[in-house]
Amino acid sequence: MEEAHTDIERREFVRIDYTVPLAYKVCKQETLSKILEGYTVDISQSGLQCNLKDWVNINDILWLSFEKSILRIFEELEKRSLIYQSGVIGKVVRIMNNENGSYNVGLQFLTREEKI
């Protein structure tokens, strides 16, 4: 018997492919002064996926700065998310290893109402 396969979108917001360079900092005492680089892969109103060369941990808080183009999504992002020094604050929720030694990292944007 063949099972029916359904692709159910479980995300609250649609993700858009969006690749631009980004700078980020891991919000810890020992790493806060170190600016690292990567690039975005996709983005939604609630988070993004990015590619990083350096390891981060689940639940790490990152400050991210990237080019915000004319995409309408950024209007909502700036209304909802915690913005600090022209960057958005996000929490690492997923890490996937890539064959080239980099990591695809899923981040959930922190909202203005959340406490860090």
Image (spheres, rainbow, N blue to C red):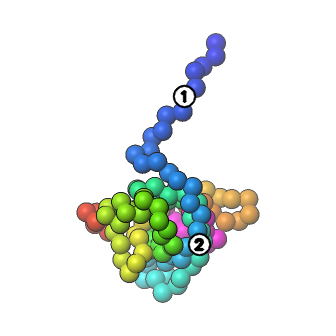
Q: Magenta stretch: residue 54 in it?
A: yes
- Residue 33 position in % (x across, y down): 48, 87
Residue drawn at point x = 46 percent, y = 55 percent: 44
x and y percentages locating residue 53 in the rendered image? 64, 71
Q: Which mark is residue 36?
A: none
Image-quadrant location for residue 52: bottom right
In-image side of 100 versus 9 (left or right): right
Q: Counting other residues with Cα less than 10 Å from the Cα at mark 2, is it few (<14), some (14-19), or many (20 or more)?
A: some
Residue extending furthest toward the left: 113
48 or 61, which is in the foreground? 48
The residue located at (25%, 63%) in the rendering is 113
* Residue at numbered disc 1: 6
The residue tagged with tag 2: helix, strand or loop?
Answer: strand
Are discs 2 and 1 less than 8 Å apart at CB?
no
Choose mark 2 or mark 1, whichever is in front. Answer: 2
Find residue 104 and report its image quarter.
Answer: bottom right
| Camera-side residue of 42 and 56 | 42
In the orientation shown, which residue stands out farthest toward the bottom? 33
Prevailing secondary structure of the magenta residues: loop
Q: Amino acid at mark 1?
A: Thr
Is 12 drawn above or below residue 69 in the view shown? above
Relative to residue 31, is residue 102 drawn left or right? Answer: right
Q: Return the mark for residue 21.
A: 2
**Would residue 95 be seen by someone viewing this image from the given angle?**
no
Q: CA distance from mark 2 to mark 1?
A: 34 Å
* Residue that protrudes farthest toward the right in the picture: 100
Does residue 80 sit above or below 25 in this rendering? above
Say which residue appears at 58% left-offset and 26% top-offset. Answer: 5
In magenta, the rendered stretch is: 50-59
